């Protein structure tokens, strides 16, 4: 079974994402902080990562940069999720080498 690392601090979001991934046949590895996510990414080498951008401590963009610069190959797909998608956020998220920025509310807001 392929592993997916989900770095998400909101328990409701984590439950929903976990449910959907498990129904699709994935094993979910949860992490509630960026620091924990980095350690698990290196240890578990998941098939892909779902990254909340608005994390406590180091945010999802910094977490992504640290994962990309770690000893893992840096090619693991990272799907960025955020509920605060403002104009310009997509470019900033892509600049840290997230593969797909996905707004949780599916609307881009001006700001």
Image (cartoon, grey):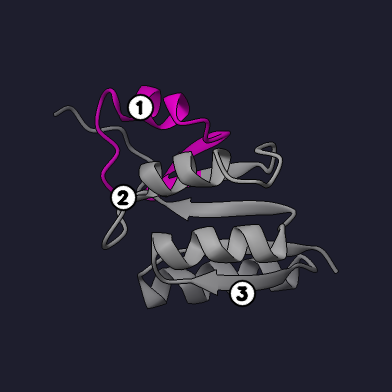
Residue 26: name its quadrant: bottom right
Question: Farthest residue in the front direction?
Answer: 71
Q: Which residue is mark 1?
A: 92
Q: Quadrant of the N terminus?
A: bottom right
As helix, strand or loop, the secondary structure at mark 3 comes to helix
Q: Neighbour class for label 2 at 10 Å: few (<14), some, many (≥20)? A: some
Q: Position of residue 97 (x, y in %)?
A: 52, 30
Q: Residue furthest left?
A: 111
Q: Secondary structure at mark 2?
A: loop
Q: Earlier in the sequence, mark 2 or mark 3?
A: 3
Q: Nearer the viewer, mark 3 or mark 1?
A: 1
The structure residue drawn at horizontal position 71% and vertical position 58%, both measured from the top left corner, is 46
Q: For this view, does 42 lie left or right of residue 94?
A: right
Q: The C terminus lies in which quarter of the figure? A: top left
In the displayed structure, would residue 51 be above or below residue 22? above
Residue at point 38%, 41% (across, down): 61
Give the magenta part as a residue range: 80-104
Label 3 vs label 1: CA separation? 29 Å
Mark 3: few/some/many CA within 10 Å (<14, 14-19, 20+): few
- Whether residue 104 sits left or right of residue 25 in the image: it is left
At horizontal 37% and vertical 69% (from top left) the residue drawn is 9
Q: Nearer the viewer, residue 27 or 76?
A: 76
Give the residue at mark 3: 19
Give the answer, above or below, for where 27 lies relative to 50.
below
Task: Please say if 93 is above or below 7.
Answer: above
The residue identified by callout 2 is 83
């Amino acid at each position: 079974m392929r592993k997916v690392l989900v770095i998400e601090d909101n328990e409701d979001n984590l439950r929903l994402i976990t449910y959907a991934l498990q129904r699709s046949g994935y094993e979910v590895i949860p992490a509630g902080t960026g620091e924990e996510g980095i350690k698990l990414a290196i240890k578990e080498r998941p098939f892909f990562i779902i990254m909340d951008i608005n994390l406590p401590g180091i945010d999802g963009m910094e977490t992504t940069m640290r994962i990309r610069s770690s000893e893992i190959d840096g090619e693991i797909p990272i799907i960025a999720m955020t509920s605060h998608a403002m104009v310009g956020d997509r470019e900033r998220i892509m600049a840290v080498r997230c593969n797909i920025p996905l707004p949780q509310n599916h609307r881009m807001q001006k700001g």
